[in-house]
Image: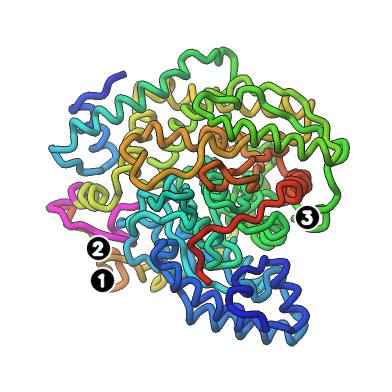
Amino acid sequence: MPGPTELTDLTIASARELLDGGSISARELAEAHIAAVENIRPLNAYMAETPDRALADADASDARRKAGQAGLLEGIPVAIKDLFCTDGILSTASSKILEGFKPTYESTVTANMWREGAVMLGKTNMDEFAMGSSNETSIYGPVENPWRRDGDNRPLVPGGSSGGSAAAVAARACLAATGTDTGGSIRQPAAFCGIVGFKPTYGRCSRWGVIAFASSLDQAGPMTRSVRDAAIMLRAMAGFDAKDSTSVDLAVPDFEAVLDQGVKGLRIGIPREYRVDGMSDEIRALWDQGLDWLKDAGAVPVDVSLPHSASALPAYYIIAPAEASSNLARYDGVRYGRRVDGDDLTQMYSRTRGEGFGAEVRRRILIGAYVLSAGYYDAYYLKAQKVRALIARDFDQAFENCDVLLAPTTPFEAFPIGEMIGDPLSMYLNDVMCVPASLAGLPAVSVPAGLSKSGLPLGLQLIGRPFDEETLFRAAQVMEQSSGFDGKPGLRGA
Amino acid sequence: MPVDRATVLKIASLARIEVPEGELDKLASELSNILGWVEQLDAVDTDGVPPMASVINVARRPRADVVNDGGIRDKILANAPDAHDGYFTVPKVIE
């Protein structure tokens, strides 16, 4: 039998093979991962551990496999971002206002995963209400990136908002984790931690039971250590759900089946506007390298223009806060979550919300309330929605001449904890290359492509047409094989 | 447009968020910076462009107008900070 290190170093695909062959059990796999979760506690990646649940899930999984009823994620130990409501298990969006909240229902995406046999290790830390790019706004404190710079022991951010998920996957403390992406919250932490992060098309995964941030942008997706694993896991997560009115009633393809179809003849668009100021030379070089890999595999490069790219980030920082201010109005201290008493109802609301929301969430709610308020709605919100339409049109036009877009995921690598948190506008720049695809609802994936001079992982991003995740997976698979990325962080669970 | 203390207080009141007196100046300056930055959108020509209303162009399908939930009072009240006799409670609203 493989030892604990080998067990936690598996992928979903390789674990599936061993489980199918009977050389390991789901219980052994779960036990190795429970130990790994304990070992990485200093990273603060999990905010709730569920070892008993994991063992029970694993035993049930072994029984199902024996009965010949194995699902797509049968016996696979996974972590769930704290944004997903999980029945009877702490679900707080890493916010004080949801302190102690244990839902009495299960999100559709996680229910789908349990139905497919996944084993739950726990919930992962995140930026409060998914608002952040460094996982420093969580009520549970910052998550540390398991990677360190060469010769520099300062703890680094894992990215955000799905920072706990990214750190746990990279540190071998789960085989995969769920993330959610509103403006880069799957892709940016995946890039910072050297893993694969896949944001599907808006509507592919149900948002039911996922604590809402900005409803026209939020989308769940897999965070894994290989492209194949992302394909396996997305298939298990996705699907039409009548409980989410924006869920799309389309058959979920077998993404894994198309992985090895290659990119011969595929047209790869290089959006010239993504050569933003502040992008490091090595990220530019990596971008060129990524294109060479795809060309070597038979793809054809195409220069494309997305003229409104520079307007995406400011439009996002009107639209997302506007939606957040509306969505987060529900936290009133009456029906669930934290309550702070007041002399009257209004004071109770104001105190509850004043104490319950952290600085970044408060800032965004106030921005949202401002841009939606009488007299400013047209100038800010309506203007941003018009710009958003132009951004979506840019993509439509680009996809007339290409099949997939290639760009870096982030303009820079992971940075030390505390370095940017005091400067919101600089922090927002983390997502400058992720936000446009979010605004247009497009599928996009970050694939680890190499290490920087300081020894940190860097990611490249592929963006596809709506509901054409299959082409994205094909291109991502070529990128992964060509890069041969096999870097492991210094801090691991086993 | 720069945001002053009075504006912060006004939107904080609209948003039902109590802001401590000592944080008003800092918030005013942060919000002014962010709003000043997003105002670069003014330079984008959006004449005749309809605002985006739907992210993905797929027809929504209506659901059947039937009762498909209910009878879960205790589940709904399970997380209430202060529930009594099957009800949520709030501070007295009517004298």
Task: Judge whether residue A470 can be spotted in this image.
Answer: no
Q: Is residue A386 above or below residue A323?
A: above
Give residue A373's quadrant in the image: top left
The residue that disc 1 covers is B84
> Closest to the observer: A367 or A425?
A425
Q: Is residue A346 magenta?
A: yes
Q: What's the mark number on residue B89?
A: 2
Three-letter code for the amino acid on which mark 1 is drawn: His
Task: Please state if B60 lies on the left or on the right of A33 as rendered.
Answer: right
Mark 1 in CB contact with mark 3 (< 8 angstroms): no
Three-letter code for the amino acid on which mark 2 is drawn: Thr
The residue that disc 3 covers is A253
**Residue in view at x 55 percent, y 66 percent:** A172
Chain to which the residue tagged by mark 1 belongs: B
**Residue in view at x 80 percent, y 53 percent:** A259
* Magenta residue span: A331-347
Q: How is the image coloured?
A: rainbow
Mark 2 in CB contact with mark 1 (< 8 angstroms): yes
